[in-house]
Amino acid sequence: MEIIKLLATNAAISTLLFLGLWRISVMIRDPSFIDGWWPLGMVVMAITTFFLSGPADPHRIALTLLCTIWGVRLGLYLLWRWRQHGADRRYTNMMHHAQTVRGWSFAKASLLLVFALQMPLQFVVCLPVQLGQVTTIGPLGLLGWSGVVLAAIGIFFETVGDAQLVRFKANPANQGKVLDTGLWRYTRHPNYFGDAATWWGLYLIAAETGWIGAASIPAPILLTILLTKWSGVPTTEGTLRKRKPDYESYIARTSGFIPLPPRRT
């Protein structure tokens, strides 16, 4: 019952926040800032769970701290990018199609296609941080520390990869070119790899707490599928192949996800 109460509380808070953000999207006619809320909403769930689950212990501290570091950094970066570049074309096209082809209002399209979809996905992906705080077992063991290291590696890859991309795009001389240096030399998507590594690391910490934490295994699996098969790699590469003529050769020599030495072509 305590687990159900905890999850229900987080779900209720998340629902209210998503509804409030949906109203903002209707007022500004742009739902694309939701990308910034994806990680920040998980921080809210991590902190809420921390205060509702009982006395602090190493696993709760590790899960909450790592999730907060990851989420605040990524959330603020995505909101900054939204403010710098304006509405995301993916969301603009989605809203236009729903309004012109389906005949939906902007409010209905924003609610059903963006906010009502992302809310449950966010909740499920965040399960390791929620369920991993239910049980108290004492100090971190080998599995827990392995999770801490993997999550730290993921945060490093995502942070450095984003910084390298921002610096690359800021140079007008790189217009139309492909970033293939730094971490981007070893994987075409260090930011997506970092995202997945962070949440697999958080899952390992949660799994060490017992079967309840281990039961959150659908979360990192779902996130990995989202990043590699749906909204991450396919969407990004579909656009880059059209805009950058050198991208095909970059694909030929560079790993698509897991960092590996460049292939000879």
Image: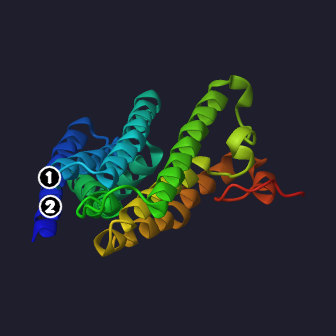
Is 72 on the left or on the right of 226, as rendered? left
Say which label, 2 or 1, has the lower sequence index.
2
Identified at 81% across, 53% down, the residue is 262
| Mark 2, residue position | 6
Report x, y in % for residue 56: 23, 48
| Of marks 2 and 1, the one in the foreground | 1
| Residue 100, position as x, y percentages in the image | 33, 56
Q: Residue at x 42, y 57 (%)?
A: 202
Circles 2 and 1: CB atoms closer than 8 Å: yes
Which residue lies at the image location 44% right of the left edge and 43% below the top edge?
88
For label 1, count other residues whose C-alpha is less than 10 Å away and answer few (under 14), some (14-19) or many (20+).
Answer: some
Q: Which corner quadrant of the image does residue 25 belong to?
A: top left
Horizontal side, residue 58 vs residue 158: left or right: left
Can residue 258 be seen in this snapshot? Answer: yes
Percent coordinates x, y for residue 51 in the rendering: 17, 47
* Label 2 SS: helix
Q: Is residue 75 above or below residue 253?
A: above
Task: Name the residue type under label 2.
Answer: Leu
Task: Find disc 1 in the rendering and name its residue.
Answer: 52
